[in-house]
Image (cartoon, grey):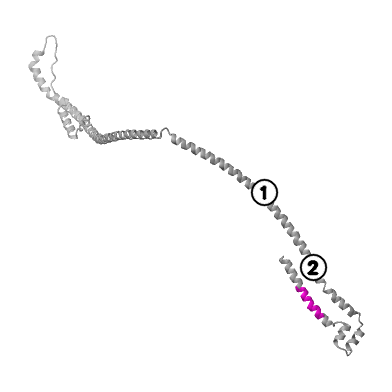
Amino acid sequence: MQSAIQIQPPTSFGDLLRQARGSRDTSPSYSRRESVAPGQADGSMNGKEESTPGVAIPPRRPLRQADVELEAKRVEARERDLRAVLQSLSDQSLKTSRRLDDTYYSILEKVSILRQTIGTLQELSGLTKELHDNFESDTTELVDDVTGQVDAFDGFKAQQEQVSGLEERIRAGKEKADALTARLERAKERVDARAKSEAQWQAKNTHRVRIFWGILGFIAAVILALVLFRPSQPTNDVLEPQNTLDPATRDAILNANIPDIAKEAIIGPSTSTVSQVVETVDPQLVLGSDERLRGFDEL
């Protein structure tokens, strides 16, 4: 890269000033001044030699002070113009030199970047080549390994036989599962039928038990009613003869001088004894009826 690109440094500002001074010395007015006198001398010396017959050369006009001043003014104007042009050229050259410097340094920077890029690309190409070689070697080894394994499997016959055996076992298991499912369905139907018949039997049994307990309760109620109403009948029978006696006869018997037992035998038990008997009988009957009712409730 260095041999292919040869970059020259830009011209400095001092070189431009020296070139401007040299151009001032070689200006047309300066050379014209130097060439006036030798021309006049040569003309005076060789005037006769250059004159030819038939050609009339007008005589030279003598120089005047006004012509010299006019020419000097013209020269000064030309010099001012040249100075302005040189100043503009120097400014332009300075700007151009700065631009060239910037361009030069940017080119140098880009060249360094290009060198780094080229080095990186060379390194990348080397790594790529090495990776390619390693990939080819690994691929070759993998192909050889796979080929050896496939050859060792002998066309996958053993695996195919194992797969066939597994398929047969799966098919047999499926058939067995279907048979078990059918048996399960039948057992489920039997269980449902048994549960239904059990529910019906339970309903019938409940109905029968209710009827039985109703009949039993009715019988118990009848017995209880008979037990409750039977003791009241003798007391009425005993009291009815007492009511047949007259009050005067009763008073005479009570006031008679006879034992009380005889009085009771004639008149019957007194009201106090009757009431005591009734009072003693009624709690027992009530207790008996309560016990029967309690037993009936427990049943």
- Horizontal placement of 290 versus 15: left or right? right
Residue highlighted by disc 2:
223
Residue at image point 31% right, 34% down: 137
Callout 2 environment at 10 Å: few (<14), some (14 to 19), or many (20+)?
Answer: some
For the question of whether residue 249 can be seen, the reply is yes
Quadrant placement of the C terminus:
bottom right
The residue at 81%/79% (across/down) is 277
127 magenta-colored: no
Q: What's drawn in magenta, residue-wise?
A: 275-287
Of 64 and 201, the residue lying toward us:
201
**Neighbours of disc 1 within 10 Å: few (<14), some (14-19), many (20+):** few
Residue position for label 1: 193
Is 284 or 55 nearer to us in this picture? Answer: 284
Badge 1 element: helix
Decide if residue 241 is on the left or right side of residue 115. Answer: right
Quarter of the rendering occupied by the N terminus: top left
In terms of secondary structure, what is the magenta stretch mainly? helix
Q: Nearer the viewer, residue 129 or 238?
A: 238
Q: Amino acid at mark 1?
A: Ala
Question: Would residue 65 be visible to someone looking at this image?
Answer: no
Q: As shown in the figure, which amino acid type bears the numbered disc 2? A: Ile
Say whether disc 2 or disc 1 marks the residue closer to the N-terminus: 1
Q: Residue 10 — which label?
A: none
View extreme (bottom): residue: 257
Q: Position of residue 17 (x, y in %)?
A: 17, 33
Q: Report how far apart the C-alphas of labels 2 and 1 lie in the structure.
A: 44 Å
Depth check: give the residue in front, 253 or 31. Answer: 253
Q: Quadrant of residue 235?
A: bottom right
Whether residues under marks 2 and 1 lie with C-beta atoms below 8 angstroms apart, the answer is: no
Location of residue 42 (image quadrant)? top left
